Amino acid sequence: MTNNKSDLIIAIFLLCFSGIMINDASNIRDLGFEGMKADAWPRVVLWMLVVMSSVMLGKSYFQYKTVSVKSYKRIFFKERKVMQITTRF
């Protein structure tokens, strides 16, 4: 099982990295060959990285949010039961 908090940090880092690299891909020199420009493939690969990182960010955020809420409810209800048991006597 992976740590969802570290997945959040990695996804944010990957999104920042790909944003910087997409911006820098426009600085690739065009050599004048026929067909696609020189910056076409780097941009395609980086946009795929953006999509995968966004999915990873969303998935890890919702898992982190769900796990933290479930553990909070478990602790809250466990303490509530203990308090009810001790107040009865």
Image: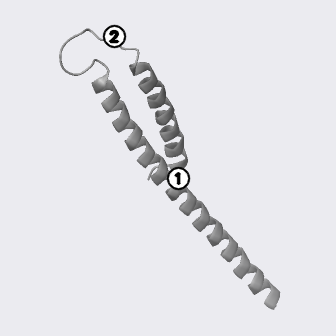
Instruction: Examine the rendered structure and indicate whether residue 82 appears above or below residue 50.
Output: below
Q: What residue type is labelled 1?
A: Tyr
Please state which of residues 21 and 40 is positioned toward the viewer in this rendering: 40
* In this view, 53 is above or below 88: above
Give the quadrant of residue 42: top left
At 39% from the left and 42% from the top, the residue drawn is: 51
Q: In this view, does 7 lie to the left or right of 36?
A: right
CA gap between label 2 and label 1 equals: 39 Å
The residue at 36%/31% (across/down) is 46
Q: In which quarter of the image is residue 70?
A: bottom right
Does 48 sit left or right of 8 as displayed?
Answer: left
Query: In percent of the image, x 34 and y 37: which residue is there?
Result: 48
The mark lying in front, picked from 2 and 1, is 2
Q: Where is residue 45 in the image (x, y as percent from the top left)?
A: 32, 31
- 47 left or right, relative to 69: left
| Amino acid on which disc 2 is placed | Arg
Within 10 angstroms of label 2, few (less than 14), some, or many (20 or more) residues? few
Question: What kind of element bears circle 1?
Answer: helix
Residue 64, position as x, y percentages in the image = 54, 55
Mark 2, residue position: 29
Q: In this view, does 66 lie to the left or right of 26?
A: right
Q: Which mark is residue 34?
A: none
Most extreme residue toward the left is 34
Q: Where is residue 84 in the image (x, y as percent from the top left)?
A: 76, 85
86 or 18, nearer to the observer: 18
Which label's residue is closer to the chain start, 2 or 1? Answer: 2
Classify mark 1: residues with Cα within 10 Å, few (<14), some (14-19) or many (20+).
Answer: some
What secondary structure is found at the residue carrying circle 2? Answer: loop
Q: Name the residue under label 1.
A: 61
Image height check: is 30 above or below 68?
Answer: above
Residue 63: x, y in percent? 50, 58
